Image: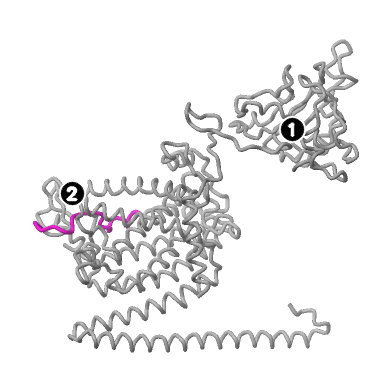
Amino acid sequence: MAELTDYIKGFAVTFKKLFEERVTGDYRGGKAKPGQPDQKRPKVERLHGRHVLNRYEDGMEKCIGCELCAGVCPAKCIHVRGADNDPDNPTSPGERFGYVYEINYLRCIHCDLCVEACPTQAITESKLFEFSFTDRNDAIYTREELLVGDDGKPQQLPWEDWREGEDELTSGWMRATSPSGDHRYEGVVQWSGELGYGVRAPELGQSDTGTGTSGGGDV
Amino acid sequence: MIIANDPLFADPFGLPEVGVVLLKVVVAFVFLLVAVMFNIWFLRKVISDMQNRIGPNLAGPWGILVTLADGVKLFFKEDLIPEKSHRVVFKLAPYLSLIPAFLVFAIVPIGGDFNRTDGPDGVISVFGHDTLLQVADPPVGVLFFLAMSSLAIYGVMLAGWGSGSKYPLLGSVRASAQMVSYEAALGLSIASVVLVSGTLSMHEMVLTQAGPGFNSFVPNWNIIVTGFIPFFVFLVAGTAELNHPPFDLVEAEQELVGGFHTEYSSIRFALFYLAEFMNQITMGAIIVTLFLGGPAGPALFVPKGWWVGVFWFFFKLMLFLFAFVWLRATLPRLRYDQLMDLGWKLLIPLSLAWFLVLAGIQIGRDRGWSSVEVGAFALSFGVVCMLCGALLMMALRSARMQRLADLDEERADLDESSPRGTLRG
């Protein structure tokens, strides 16, 4: 008998849901007509999204073409080839630069291991994941597409849905944890400056929530 | 006329009558396709409401064109035929499940005024020709429905077998076992309805249910006249026959990928999808006709006419479509043995016993028994049935205990014979 009443209770639960508030938002992929709602849900600070290739404040590229990211990638979606810098007109400070840099987003699982592996913080992830290409060639992002523009902001490709202010958070994870993974470096700047921003401050709230034993911020 | 009891065929049959028949066929066909589109949208919208989501809202107002968009997308997708498949069977199967779904709807009366004083009930006039608002009204009526729902099993079975792949095969074996088992309960509950209404023709069934019943307030619907049990059995068995949740073991994703249509893609998959939702509509329509009086209902509105029936029919149909979605949103899937237990050990004995009660009452009525006598008969029969049921349960339980005891004994034997007793599971 209890089984039967539980059965009926289940029906009551689903029926009540008809009149409750919705938990999903009204997202139209940036194609809303005027007057139509089109919101994205708020994202966490360190969301793993589309990658960007960073540049130093003077405009030089950070990538040195070492291929560590390609080596660590579990999905084997990164293809890098380095080349020697032209001494008169160098692309990056130092000997080598990333001559070919391609990420295949049909394979990428956004694990951020490439970001951890990078010795120069050249590759970081933005918070964008709303990019629905309709062509396999579009899925393979080249170095030119991944590089930040002259204003230090990621390039906005036609099939990507960027919103106001979203292009500013391109290195959340990097600035949340010290690259060495040592909690004693919490709040200590371990990262290099970025084009358009300079040396950015640590992620907000990092020291507020930490207990002193762990370097974690708000998750 | 053997084919149909339609007044259209009473007069000399000529070209204009053929035109009327063709018109009805085309209207029913188009209507059913549009209804399926609506049904799929309705399902997705209501189920998302029940899950606190918004659901499809981009194609057309309130996303009502989402099915059309899906259909167009599926139509232009690549059509894959597996290497190991039996090509002819593989291509034939979707049509075998789609066509019965269409044909069943042909015998459903979808409208007509059943409160007429100026002529026979439910008959409408199309271009001066009297006819019924249903494509065909064969004298075999409900049997045609049973025949078609049996035929639909072939579509599922052959799809699974012809795919040449293991999951579809398992899915189709499940499907045919399930559909065959529940067909029995389905047929027995229909038998109760046929017994009460005394006809197989769908139109005449509506006629017997039209008009006021007990106390001239309670409707004279079969759901009340047959005493709810056949309705309940039909609803459960019909849901199982549709492979609709909670009986969707046929396409249990966690176990069988997609079941019988795993290997199907593009427009062939769309045909299965179409058939599934079309079957929901036709099953709802059949339930409405058999148990809820079909298009018969009080004429509440001032301009009376055939559309009063249409209104009542769709009103009742919508209730069932909603109920199907509600079931889908609420109930978890049954396990396979639970499914078989429910079908064979509950629904079939229940509907069989109820059928006997109804038959007894019917005979009593024919012999002119008083209502007290009939009541006494029903009561004593109920007691007998309960005793039989108790005996059956005891038999099942003792058989089960015996089986378990045998199993234990076997295990004990194995333990003794194997030196380390490692075989104990």
Position above or below: B386 against B145:
below
Badge number at residue A125: 1
Q: Would you say B189 lies left or right of A47 here?
A: left
Pinpoint the chain carrying mark 1.
Answer: A
- Give residue A194's position: percent from left, percent from top: 80, 23
Q: Quadrant of residue B166?
A: bottom right
- Give residue A90's position: percent from left, percent from top: 85, 15
Q: Amino acid at mark 2?
A: Val
Indicate yes or no whether the magenta region holds residue A115.
Answer: no
Which element type, helix, strand or loop, lies under badge 2?
A: helix
Q: Nearer the viewer, residue B22 or B365?
A: B365
Residue furthest to the top in view is A88
Which element type, helix, strand or loop, lies under badge 1?
A: strand
Q: Residue at x 85, y 19 (%)?
A: A92
Q: Quadrant of residue A65?
A: top right
Q: Nearer the viewer, residue B298 or B327?
A: B298
Give the magenta part as a residue range: B102-119
